[in-house]
Amino acid sequence: MALCALSDMEALLQNNITNPVDPMALTILDLASLAVEAEVGRDLEATALTGIVRTMDLGNNGVLLTDHWPLASIESVTEDGELLVFGTDYFEDLELGTITRISGTNAFVIAWDAGPSSIVLDYTPLTPGVARTECARIAADAFIGGANFAARSSIAGGAMRPPPQLTTGRWSGTAETGAGSGTTGVIIDELARTRLSVIVDRRP
């Protein structure tokens, strides 16, 4: 699932790519999403997750960090089979994706159960706005590059064209596209790297 929609690309391109759907645009959108996630270093899709099990020795640290953030919501937190109550047993910070264990309404921070605690979480991540914006921007740039290449190739006699390329500092790969598609690079440029740096992990 892409981090942004074709309509986000279309708004930047100011050109129809949704009716009919352009197959190259879909491929580039997926590659752009992978590039953004590779740069940030985590999954950014806003898909509800259930039964996420965290088994660890949390010691005296009352703060649990989820694997995803920010979060749209936390549906449930279970510790060693006991369903915890928000406001009584834990507080949450959806922006940071943290769950803090507390003791009753006095809100004293306490440790999670001693020893390896089995914590089961149900929550829904939220795709950061900057991730969606940069996904659409780099996808649109790549689409323009592919369209220009295809036009030049057509003039030159329609030579074989390789599939779109994805290039980041941490990940590279290719994706097959349909016949007649152009070639382009989905590139995390310095502007995207700077903007995305604000959602790289800086939690406590």
Image (tube, grey):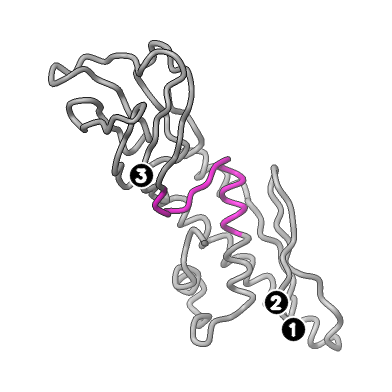
Amino acid type of the residue tagged 1 in the rendering? Gly
Residue at numbered disc 1: 180
Q: Nearer the viewer, residue 116 or 172?
A: 116
Front: mark 3 or 1: 3
2 or 1: tag closer to the N-terminus: 2
| Outermost residue, top side | 60
**Which contiguous range is marked in magenta?**
32-49
The mark found on residue 32 in the picture is none
Residue at numbered disc 3: 123
Image location (x, y in percent) of residue 123: 36, 44
Q: Residue at x 48, y 22 (%)?
A: 56
Image position of 1 (left or right of 66): right
The mark found on residue 148 in the picture is 2
Q: Is residue 94 above or below residue 61?
A: below
Q: Residue at x 38, y 49 (%)?
A: 126
36 is within the stretch colored magenta: yes
